[in-house]
Amino acid sequence: MTEEQVEKKDDNVVFIGKKPTIGYVLAVLTQLNQGVPEVIIKARGKQICKAVTVAELVRKRYLPEVKIKDIKIDTEELTAEDGRTMRVSAIEIVVGK
C-alpha cells in the first residue's frame, strides 16, 4: 500500500478521547453525510463507554438509517514512560448506512 492509500484508509476513523461527546458525534455525522459508506469509531480504556455512546447517539437520535456493522474488541500492549508494559482494552465500532 502506498502512503496515500494508508491516509485514505484512515479518513473514516474517529478516535475517541477526552473532548466532549458531541464533538465526536458531529465528526461521525459529518463523514456519513459526505458520503463515506462507513465510519470506524475507535477508543481505548476509559473512553470505551464514550465510543458506545457516540455510536448510539448517531444511530438513535440523528441518523436512524445508520446501522452498527461490526464491533471488534482487543487488548493492546502499551509501554509507559517508565518502561512498564501495560495492557489496555480497545474497541472498534463500525457504523454505516
Image: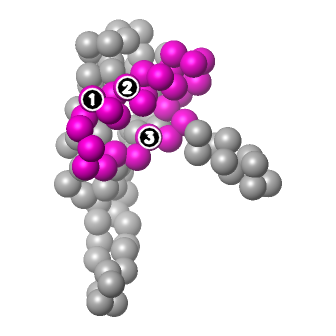
Considering every residue shown, the one lying at the far right of the view is 2
Element type at mark 3: strand
> Which residue was labeled with disc 1?
22
The tag on residue 14 is 3
Question: What kind of element bears circle 2?
Answer: helix
Quarter assignment of residue 24: top left
Query: Does residue 37 belong to the magenta stretch?
Result: yes
Q: Nearer the viewer, residue 82 or 73?
A: 82
- Residue type at numbered disc 1: Ile
Q: Of the residues under marks 3 and 2, which one precedes in the sequence?
A: 3
Q: State the quadrant of the N terminus.
A: bottom right
Residue 96 visible in rendering: no
**Tag 3 and tag 2, C-beta contact below 8 Å:** no
The magenta region covers 12-39
At horizontal 30% and vertical 49% (from top left) the residue drawn is: 17
Q: Earlier in the sequence, mark 3 or mark 1?
A: 3
Is 25 colored magenta in this rendering? yes
Report, in whole angstroms, how far the alpha carbon at label 2 lies from the one at label 1: 6 Å
Residue 53 drawn above or below residue 79: above
Q: Are marks 2 and 1 in contact (CB under 8 Å)?
A: yes
The answer to whether residue 18 shows anywhere in this view is: yes
- In the structure shown, which secondary structural element does the residue marked by tag 1 occupy? helix
Q: Residue at x 20, y 43 (%)?
A: 49
**Amino acid of disc 2:** Leu
